[in-house]
Image (cartoon, rainbow, N blue to C red):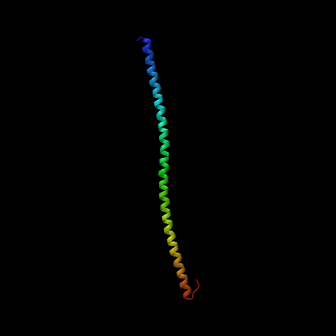
């Protein structure tokens, strides 16, 4: 192998290494971008689950308050009837 062939082989290897490095760098950037995109749905699902829990909690509280209101309305009706029975005006 003469010096020209050896030089061109070394240059070819050097260019190949640089090209390989560029490809690896760009591939890593793409991988990071895809990781960012795939973590977004995960974050949204976690937020949705957290908000679903809050909605469930608020619905339970609303049901409790509604039951208390119904009990209060029944007590008001009972007291009005008692006032009328005792000769008063409701």
Q: Quadrant of residue 11?
A: top left
Q: Residue at x 47, y 44 (%)?
A: 39
- Placement of 36 over or under 67, stated as above or below: above
- Placement of 48 over or under 27, stated as above or below: below
Locate the N terminus and report the quarter of the image it occupies: top left
Locate the C terminus and report the quarter of the image it occupies: bottom right
Count of marks, rendered view = 0
Q: Residue at x 49, y 36 (%)?
A: 30
The extreme front residue here reads 1
- Placement of 49 over or under 71, stated as above or below: above
Residue 40 position in % (x across, y down): 49, 45
The extreme top residue here reads 2
Residue 64 position in % (x across, y down): 48, 68
The extreme right residue here reads 89
Q: Residue at x 48, y 43 (%)?
A: 38
The extreme left residue here reads 1
Residue 49 position in % (x across, y down): 47, 54
């Amino acid at each position: 192998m003469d010096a020209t062939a050896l030089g061109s082989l070394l240059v070819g290897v050097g260019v190949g290494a640089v090209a390989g490095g560029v490809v690896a760098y760009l591939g890593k950037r793409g991988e990071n971008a895809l990781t960012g995109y795939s973590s977004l749905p995960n974050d949204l699902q976690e937020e949705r689950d957290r908000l679903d829990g809050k909605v469930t909690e608020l619905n339970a509280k609303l049901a409790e308050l509604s039951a208390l209101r119904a009990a209060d309305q029944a007590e008001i009706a009972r007291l009005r009837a008692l006032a009328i029975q005792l000769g008063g005006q409701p």
